Amino acid sequence: MVLVAHGSRDPRAAAATSALASAVAASHPSWEVHASYLDHAGPRPLDVLRRLSRSGARRAVVVPLLLTAAYHGKVDIPVVLRDASSLDLDVSLSDVLGPVSDLLVDGLVRRLPTAELDAVVLAAAGTRDAAARTTVSDAAAALGARLGIPCTVAYASASAPTADVAVRSLGPGRVGVASYFLAPGLLHDKAVAAALEAGAVAAAPPLTDAPEIVELVGRRVFSALSEGLMAA
């Protein structure tokens, strides 16, 4: 199983991805789980797949650690699969983690501070991809419904509103920040800092290796394997 994260210059991001890979491996002892990165950190996913092919592995599942199917899911990951097609290795691609699900909402709730909140901002990295923004909006709607309080979206880059604007839009009251991030880094820090400065009372850490994310990765792997068997 090759987990593919975006990658970051911030070493905390790679540490979070490694923690998730370790948690997935612990949950599925029969799997050989590898972390890889599209940018900044290493190893690259294609390098991992080449190494697996040389070692005699017969099959690999690539799992994009992405919460939306934006540029990296639509362009970068397919390039990896194309370049891996010449390897003596059967490579399957799973769906991204992001379409809203009970598991994802459970993970968001788990990471939220326990204090009583009147409203929540769901902070995400940001994208110009309209379909990806819809995914985030759907997650915010599901989170608000689960908590029974208003929930609105904020972005750290590329899209509006920013976290401070989102916090102020919710009016007076105790506003918390939920994290639509898988790993810490500059954009998460930026969103949290803006929200707290605007009056948010608490902010959640990224999802990282939350049990729900571990289970979600497992489900993506089983689905990809099942689709591969049907195709065969």
Image (tube, rainbow, N blue to C red):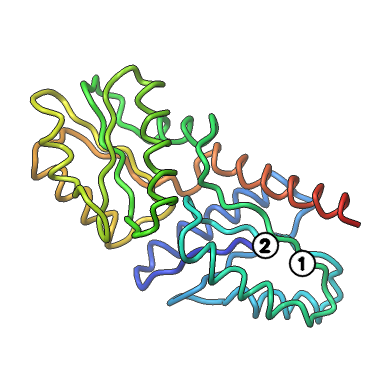
Q: Residues within 10 Å of mark 2 (few under 14, many from 20)?
A: many
For residue 101, the mark is: none
- 155 versus 104 height, above or below: below
Secondary structure type for disc 2: strand
Along the viewing direction, whichever of 101 and 13 lies nearer the viewer: 101
Tally the numbered discs.
2
Image side of residue 44 versus residue 228, left or right:
left
Seen from this angle, which residue lies furthest right?
Answer: 232
Among the 4 quarters of the image, the one containing residue 196: top left
- Label located before the other in sequence (1 or 2): 2
Q: Quadrant of the N terminus?
A: bottom right
Image side of residue 24 versus residue 222, left or right:
left
Image side of residue 183 versus residue 162, left or right:
right
Q: Which residue is mark 1?
A: 91
Residue 4 image offset from top left, x and y in percent: 57, 64
Seen from this angle, which residue lies furthest top?
Answer: 148
Residue at x-position 60% and y-position 54%: 22
Task: Report how far apart the C-alphas of labels 1 and 2 lie in the structure.
Answer: 7 Å
Residue 150 image offset from top left, x and y in percent: 26, 24
Q: Which residue is mark 2?
A: 62
Q: Are marks 1 and 2 in contact (CB under 8 Å)?
A: yes
Residue at x-position 34% and y-position 60%: 128
Residue 80 image offset from top left, x and y in percent: 63, 74
Residue at x-position 33% and y-position 49%: 124
Among the 4 quarters of the image, the one containing residue 204: top left
Image side of residue 33 versus residue 168, left or right:
right
Q: Which amino acid, mark 1? A: Val
Q: Residues within 10 Å of mark 1 (few under 14, many from 20)?
A: many
Q: Which amino acid, mark 2? A: Val
Residue 220 image offset from top left, x and y in percent: 67, 47
Q: Quadrant of the C terminus?
A: bottom right
